[in-house]
Image: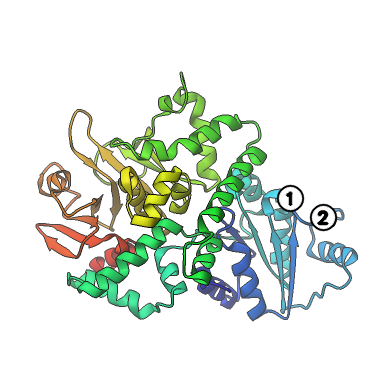
């Protein structure tokens, strides 16, 4: 069963470009990179040649005669004479690029040769990407892939684009959803929150129409990520990286969700752990949300690099990290318990990143003024609040109404509830988060 993904359209557009360059698809493991590339190749090429540098390390010798495309093709055919290299009809797929970043040097020569399309892929590419970049600068295109967002989850459940267009129209017009729509989307969104967006887990859920076996898959994937840390965290304290990775749910469950290194281990100091945080971010396993120095534009450079929140790249990982009693309560009774705020904040952070936003929050020292996230339009700064209920939003209202913050003219609030627009606050259900960028764009138009 192949699940439709947003990369499908990107790959089709890439192939239609007469001047396309070799493509590098980046992203965490198990998000569907390899499967999507294979599906694309089967539909568009007469010959598809896949080299996995983890499963077939013998192919690391294909650069023994240099990086020219002709030399690499010759060495590949020497290892396996059955491979067919048809000019203009062949896709070469180098998978697990992080195991053999040297092959990136050849991308320049494949681009100049022009007879074969080339796609590279791998997980944890952020760790060795400076090396890959220096080997192929100017002769490649990058694409960052993520786990499935809620829109892709809805596709998997059989909902077509017309449904998403209707949801966006509700947002643009400020029209509340009817009772059936709210109940349907709320239930689907809660299922998505519990499952996360890793295709293997979603497929099992689609196949059985139950949650049977999904937790075991999540737990195994979680262990795979921990194993990646042990394998690839060279020159760093692996134990410290694992401590940070494992401590995220504990800190997100607190009222003050700022990540505190001092809580990770006795005597822990920021300077000793900074490399660990950067490693997890570069690997794609966490999203970092930095604290703004002041709620104004521009955002880049206007933050404190030592104050931040950490979120998992996929909310399914947060769910898998919960204790057994919470797991049972969540699945049986749909009770999010103390993790309610953590779960919804993580899912909104995840949706913002997948929408192309960087993550920022604000908390004023010695004050109750605090805002969960910020995004920007061409002209304005937009605070984004994540609430359990449609209650008072004192901080959001202060940011909108005060003359101190001229870049802020309205705010957005996500709740478990319906659509409403009042006094500059535009309130939407959680399940609309994936449409935020399209909604913001519609306001600009």
Q: Which residue is mark 2?
A: 63
Do the CB atoms of the residues marked 2 and 1 lie less than 8 Å apart?
yes
Is residue 37 positioned above or below 367 on the image?
below
**Sequence-wise first label, 2 or 1:** 2
Name the quadrant of the C terminus. Answer: bottom left
Q: Left or right? Give the position of 238 relative to 318.
A: right
Report crowding for label 1: few under 14, some 14 to 19, many 20 or more residues within 10 A (C-alpha): some
Asked whether 269 or 210 is in front, the reply is: 210
In the drawing, what numbered circle is on residue 172? none
The quadrant holding residue 213 is: bottom right
- Indicate the position of residue 277 as horizontal and vertical percent values: 49, 36
Q: Which residue is mark 1?
A: 102
Q: Left or right? Give the position of 5 relative to 166.
A: right
- CA separation in Å, label 2 and label 1: 9 Å
Is residue 219 positioned above or below 239 on the image?
below
Q: Left or right? Give the position of 379 relative to 122.
A: left
Q: Left or right? Give the position of 405 relative to 242.
A: left
- Indicate the position of residue 396 as horizontal and vertical percent values: 17, 48
């Amino acid at each position: 069963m192949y699940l439709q993904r947003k990369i499908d359209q990107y790959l089709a557009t890439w192939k239609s470009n007469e001047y396309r360059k070799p493509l590098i698809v980046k992203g965490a493991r198990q998000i569907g990179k390899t499967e999507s590339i294979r599906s694309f190749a089967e539909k568009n090429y007469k010959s598809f040649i896949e080299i996995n540098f983890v499963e077939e390390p013998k192919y690391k010798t294909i650069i023994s005669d240099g990086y020219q495309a002709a030399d690499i093709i010759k060495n590949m055919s020497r290892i396996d004479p059955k491979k067919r290299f048809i000019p203009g009809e062949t896709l070469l797929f180098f998978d697990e690029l992080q195991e053999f970043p040297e092959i990136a040097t050849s991308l320049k020569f494949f681009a100049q040769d022009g007879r074969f399309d080339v796609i590279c892929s791998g997980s944890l590419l952020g760790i060795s990407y400076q090396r890959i970049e220096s080997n192929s600068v100017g002769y490649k295109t990058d694409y960052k892939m993520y786990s499935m967002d809620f829109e892709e989850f809805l596709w998997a459940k059989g909902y077509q684009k017309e449904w998403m267009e209707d949801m966006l129209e509700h947002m643009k017009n400020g029209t509340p959803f009817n009772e059936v729509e709210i109940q349907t989307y709320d239930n689907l969104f809660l299922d998505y929150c519990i499952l996360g967006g890793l295709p293997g887990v979603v497929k099992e859920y689609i196949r059985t129409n139950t949650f049977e076996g999904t937790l075991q898959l999540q737990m195994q994937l979680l262990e795979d990520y921990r194993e990646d840390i042990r394998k690839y965290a060279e020159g760093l304290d692996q134990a410290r990286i694992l401590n940070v990775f494992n401590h995220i749910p504990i800190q997100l469950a607190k009222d003050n969700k700022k990540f505190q290194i001092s809580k990770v281990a006795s005597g822990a100091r920021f300077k000793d752990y900074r490399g660990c945080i950067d490693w997890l971010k570069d690997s794609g396993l966490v999203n970092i949300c930095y604290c703004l120095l002041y709620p104004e534009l521009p955002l880049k450079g206007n933050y404190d690099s030592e104050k931040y929140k950490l979120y998992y790249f996929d909310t399914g990982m947060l769910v898998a990290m919960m204790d057994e009693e919470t797991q049972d309560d969540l699945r049986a009774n749909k009770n999010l318990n103390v993790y309610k705020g953590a779960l919804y904040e993580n899912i909104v952070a995840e949706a913002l990143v997948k929408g192309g936003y960087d993550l920022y929050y604000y908390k004023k020292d010695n004050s109750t003024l605090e805002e969960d996230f910020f995004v920007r339009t061409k002209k304005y700064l937009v605070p984004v609040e994540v609430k359990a209920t449609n209650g008072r939003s004192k901080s959001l209202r202060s940011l909108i109404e005060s003359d101190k913050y001229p870049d802020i003219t309205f705010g957005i609030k996500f709740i478990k509830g319906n659509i409403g627009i009042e006094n500059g606050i535009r309130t939407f259900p959680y399940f609309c988060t994936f449409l935020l960028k399209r909604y913001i764009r519609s306001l600009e138009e």
